[in-house]
Image (spheres, rainbow, N blue to C red):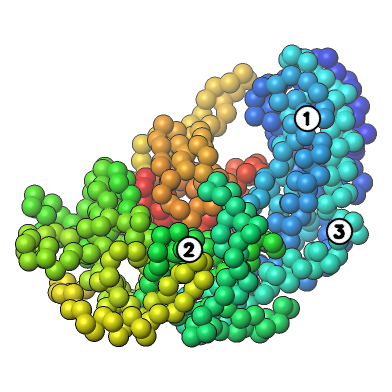
Amino acid sequence: MKSSEELRRNLRAIDHKSYPAYKSLAGSYSFGNYTLHIEHVQGDPFAAPSRLSVEVSHKIAGFPSKYYESKWDKTALEDYLLRRFHKQVDKFCFQAKGSGKSGIITVSRCGQEILERTAGEITKDACIIRFEAGFPANGRTINAPELEKILFDFIPVCVEQSLFYEKTPKRELEQVIFLAEDQHFIREEMKKQDIVAFVADGSILPRESGVSDRPLKEGIPFHSPETMAVTFELPHKGNLRGMGIKKGITLIVGGGYHGKSTLLKALERGVYHHINGDGREYVITEESALKLRAEDGRKITNTDISLFINHLPNGKDTKKFCTLDASGSTSQAANIVEGIEAGSKLLLIDEDTSATNFMVRDELMQKIVAREKEPITPFLERAKDLYEKAGISTILVVGSCGSYFHIADKILQMDSYQAVDITSETKEIIKEYPVPAITAPGFHLPSEKRYIDLSGSVQKRKTYRGNGYVEERLKIKRMGKTAFSVGKENLDMRYVEQLVDEEQTQTLAYLLRYAKEHYGDEKSDVSGIVKALENILRTKGLAGICDKGNVPSGLAMPRTQEIFACFNRY
């Protein structure tokens, strides 16, 4: 390892030279209290910024080891340090001048959810923050004094103010760790009590706006109906009362704009832990919960949708169904079956975003169009079996379909953003109404493996450059949170609604590329590939799918359900 003074000398020696001379700075440098790694230098001031990282040993950082012993504490601490580093970096962004992206300093911008990220990592030896910086230039000529400002003035301040325990607000950090431990405790207690979702009293569920995930400042605090109230005695917060939704079929009903979809949205995001002040810190949902919707136009490959769709008039096989352009009902059927394959034990469905003919067929329609003429078995006729025979619960928002009252275990009405348990009253009322005819054919779960073809533009290839051959991988391009491309192939993820961060989408692209490179020459089943990738992520972390010694800063951990969703749409 070189010293920081060597870096300063080398930097001054290349001042006013052509921009590619910056590449000679790549390497590791000791700055006393921390190590600076210049991992990749951009080739042009207008190109993507250079990649750097800072590493502080635990002995110097000084954070108590108990704060990163468990997985949930470690992730919370990584998230906290990354947010503090981001706050410092923001002060210095573009303070160094030059052309193009000169002077930009960026690090992952964390949202309301706490995610495992490559940008902030705690290893057994050190705390690491990965970030990007635009190396300054005038035109395409090196401006060394401006880069010297970044590396010797700005970054040391960022490190000192964010990565040393002695500079950290102790009470604030303690609350971050305590919250993570309380959230984990609730998850474990929910399993013991057969609860699939919990919403604490006082939670603020409405968001600032449709494009902001921050809490609404004047939002009405949630309060649990007495009949659904449970109290957890948390390790740090003490007694916490809230609404516990038990396993089974739960309906959320109510008039328009009264908070039905807002509650479901909070439950959808409850698969992740949230930061202090989000309002949903204690909204906790079964980790495998899957938000489902109709997805017109999606691709479906070798999926057994016969549980919901059978005897098509063209004789097409629905046990290995394929289409490049699925209808709303077909896509929703495939989404449920694929969710079962991904291990989901809770389905979250909103009537507003579902295909009507998939959800229900009323009695008059059944009389006019006989069952043998209708290929679709509606979800109404499968929901009970999914729970009783497969252990898969459902939380369903309905606003117009009363047939679901007959099969519901619990009925919750949202009235001006307040929850009311109306199960008993509703069960009395529906005695006056005929039970819908539910005569679905035999229930079965898909059992055959689904194989995926990952061939095509797959392998790494060697390209001649300058003095020799270099290995190139398929290029990845992310289009926000909703889509990405690997090579020339595009994937549309816009309706995978539990992707909460564009860095999760970037990780899915990396996972797909890794699978193409390692499993592209063999016939592989989807479950087998996902399990192999999860094993890599579990044992090696996100670095396991990156080039050795070249871990980018912009990856965040997706759930199993989103990994399956990625491969199912490939």
Q: How far apart are marks 3 and 2 (CA)?
A: 39 Å
Q: What residue is at 86 percent from the left and 61 percent from the top?
A: 169
Give yes or no for contact between labels 3 and 1 (Cβ–Cβ under 8 Å): no
Q: What residue is at 78 percent from the left and 20 percent from the top?
A: 98
Q: Which of 346 and 463 is in front in this view?
A: 346
In the rendered image, residue 460, in percent from the top left (x then y), is placed at 48, 35
Disc 3: CA contacts within 10 A as few (<14), some (14-19) or many (>=20): some
Query: In the rendered structure, which amino acid carries the disc numbered 1?
Result: Phe
Quarter of the view holding residue 77: bottom right
Quarter of the view holding residue 389: bottom left
Q: What residue is at 26 percent from the left and 42 percent from the top?
A: 324
Q: Which of marks 1 and 2 is nearer the N terminus?
A: 1
Q: How far apart are marks 3 and 1 (CA)?
A: 26 Å
In the rendered image, residue 151, in percent from the top left (x then y), is placed at 85, 35
Mark number displayed over residue 94:
1
Q: Earlier in the sequence, mark 3 or mark 1?
A: 1
Query: In the rendered structure, which amino acid carries the disc numbered 2?
Result: Gly
Quadrant in which the N terminus is drawn: top right
Q: Which of marks 3 and 2 is nearer the N terminus?
A: 3
Query: In the rendered structure, which amino acid carries the disc numbered 3?
Result: Thr
Q: Nearer the viewer, residue 42 or 266?
A: 266
**Label 3 SS:** loop
Establish if 47 lies above or below 193: above
In the rendered image, residue 173, in percent from the top left (x then y), is placed at 80, 64
Q: Name the residue under label 2.
A: 259
